[in-house]
Amino acid sequence: MSEKFPPLIADRMCGKLAKYLRIMGFEVCYPPAMTDINLIGMAIRKSAVLLTRDRWIEEKMRDSSRADQVILLKSDDVYQQVCHVLDRLGIAGPPFVDNARCIYCGGELLELNAWEAKNLVPPYVFRTQIEIFHCPICNLQFWKGTQWQSFEGRLVNFSKTYSEGKKISENS
Ligand SMILES: [Zn+2]
């Protein structure tokens, strides 16, 4: 997914959003606390899109003719935030989990073969999960458990509601 879309930078108020976008395979940088100016500088240097809840940051980006490099998130709800980002990136409908990334570091996950997985995850996970992934940076394992399924389900519903809502507001 990283080839098609610009890298994203999430500000400190968008940690949960960063996590969700990483699950979906987006390259998301979640830098430690830094000044707004440094954050803007980082987005410009990396040709990244800045995800922020800060109106001032959005204005600064617009003033520097970089409106296409900032997404101001107005909703508190992470599912609506995800839908907003997808919409701004021109992704119609849920793109689902191409190459999930590590929710902690954003690194690319590797799929483990059965032998490797067996030694790394609890037996019940090994028995019930078909795909088990590994983050080589954090040395952690991930699988599509019930939380993942509820995330996908909620997001499908949200993106439907979101696009229907948009159609209504565009037509009125
Ligand atoms: Zn990691």
Image (tube, rainbow, N blue to C red):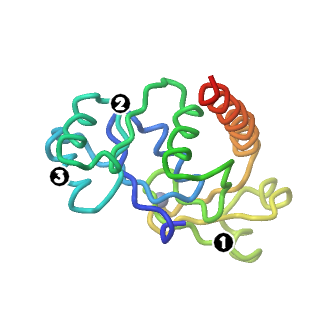
Q: In this rendered view, identify the residue nearer to me: 168 or 56.
A: 168
Cα–Cα gap, marks 1 and 2: 34 Å
Q: Is residue 103 above or below residue 156?
A: below
Residue 46, percent across and down? 27, 62
Counting from the top left corner in percent of width and height, residue 120 is at: 65, 65
Identify which residue is drawn at 72% across, 76% down.
113
Residue denoted by label 1: 111
Which of discs 1 and 2 lies nearer the camera? The answer is 2
Local packing at callout 1 (Cα closer than 10 Å; few below 14, some 14-19, many 20+) is some
What residue do we see at 49% from left, 71% from top?
A: 3
Residue pushed farthest right? 127
Counting residues from the start of the chain, the first of labels 3 and 1 encountered is 3
User: Which secondary structure, mark 1?
Assistant: strand
Does ligand 1 reach within 8 Å of label 2's beta carbon? no
Q: Residues within 10 Å of mark 2 (few under 14, many from 20)?
A: some
Q: Nearer the viewer, mark 3 or mark 1?
A: 3
Left or right, 70 with respect to 56, comes to right
Q: Quadrant of the N terminus?
A: bottom right
Give residue 67's quadrant in the image. Answer: top left
Q: Image quadrant for the C terminus?
A: top right
Of 94 and 152, which appears nearest the observer? 94
Q: Quadrant of residue 150?
A: top right
- The local secondary structure at tag 3 comes to helix
Q: Which residue is mark 2?
A: 53
Residue 130 horizontal/vertical position (percent): 81, 64
Number of dots carrying numbers: 3
Q: Which residue is mark 3?
A: 41
Q: Give the Cα distance between marks 3 and 2.
A: 17 Å
Distance in Å between CA atoms under marks 3 and 1: 35 Å
Question: Residue, x 81% and y 53% (percent of image)?
Answer: 124
